Image (cartoon, rainbow, N blue to C red):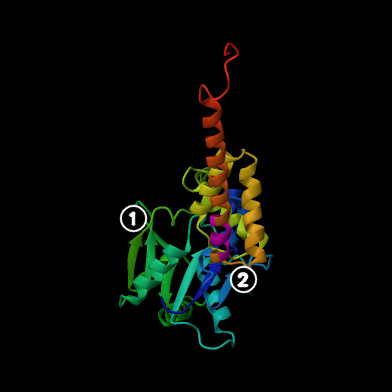
Amino acid sequence: MNAYDAIVLAGGAARRLGGADKPGVRVGGRALLDRVLHACAGARATVVVAEPRGTDRPVVWAREEPAGGGPLAALEAGVRGLDTPRGPVAESVLVLSADLPFLGEPTVRRLLDALEGDAADGVLLADGDGRDQPLVAAYRYAALRRALGELKAEHGDLDGLPLRLLTRTLGLTRITDPVASFDCDTWDDIAAARSRIREHGRVLDEWITAAKNELGIELDVDTGVLLDLARDAAHGVARPAAPLTTFLVGYAAAQAGGGPEAVASAAAKAAELANRWAQEADSQQGAEAKPGDAASPDAG
């Protein structure tokens, strides 16, 4: 995957949410905008088209003219934000809306890889029903900039123009991802996303990602190793030993310089101790259960 830039549109009116601050709505404890910014964290430059706000990582802010002028006006503002003097713009530009709770880096990589391997002007994500999502897409910067310029020359400005005018002028291909393309337009969508976050098989990864963001740490570790350690400590020692042991492993890893290798080493040592503790307890219980080890009261 080559270098890319990103434009995130986060300034809509959210009328179907009653005018709520949609980018700031939390799903799984994280603002929708921050979830999207995490998915495109590999971008060289990221322009967010909205009023400035606090975000988990630094971005460049831009605003469409007039404010609330619709997606094409916002997209043009994002392109202008990339054009400011910071060096050449990347050949590939990721364009995202700020209401995608399940977008992740693997889907971003799929879009960009598909664009690199194709002669098209862009690659869109399609939902499970085959509907195009032009705000979950990777475009060739030159083609996107040219198409926006042509539309502006034709219509005078881009205020209120629909996105389909853009997609009609570009040569596009599509990949399908019904999960990553899920967007939150209504409170029912928000409720569905919050419920899905807590599903078995997803909740731990979601929680760990949220916790790392909240604590300001970047650390990829084998969660299976830590879960196995917690199980061994709870079974072989006592239930409260599980969270206390994992805390001590984290502290020991930090003292050793941090990183996945330090966590794995500390976890292995603690797991071995928990196993020895369990074996000792099993051995003791076995000895106490053996008959005839002590003299019978009737002996002699």
Residue at image position (61%, 71%) is 66
Q: Viewed as shown, does residue 218 lie left or right of 150?
A: right
Q: Which residues are magenta?
A: 262-268
Q: For the C terminus, which image quadrant?
A: top right
Residues 128 and 202: in front is: 202
Pointer 1 residue: 130
Residues 187 and 275: in front is: 275
Label placed on residue 112: none
Question: Residue 8 placed where, x, y %?
Answer: 54, 68
Pointer 2 residue: 66
SS for callout 1: loop
SS for callout 2: loop
| 276 shown above or below 296 | below
Residues 274 and 142: in front is: 274
Question: Residue 274 placed where, x, y %?
Answer: 57, 46
Residue at image position (61%, 59%) is 212
Question: Residue 200 placed where, x, y %?
Answer: 48, 42
Q: Viewed as shown, does residue 114 lie left or right of 182?
A: left
Q: Earlier in the sequence, mark 1 or mark 2?
A: 2
Residue at image position (60%, 55%) is 210
The answer to which quarter of the image holds residue 177 is: bottom left
The answer to which quarter of the image holds residue 254 is: bottom right
Question: Residue 49 placed where, x, y %?
Answer: 59, 70
Of the residues shown, which amino acid type is indicated by label 1?
Answer: Gly
Question: Distance between the Cα atoms at labels 1 and 2?
Answer: 32 Å
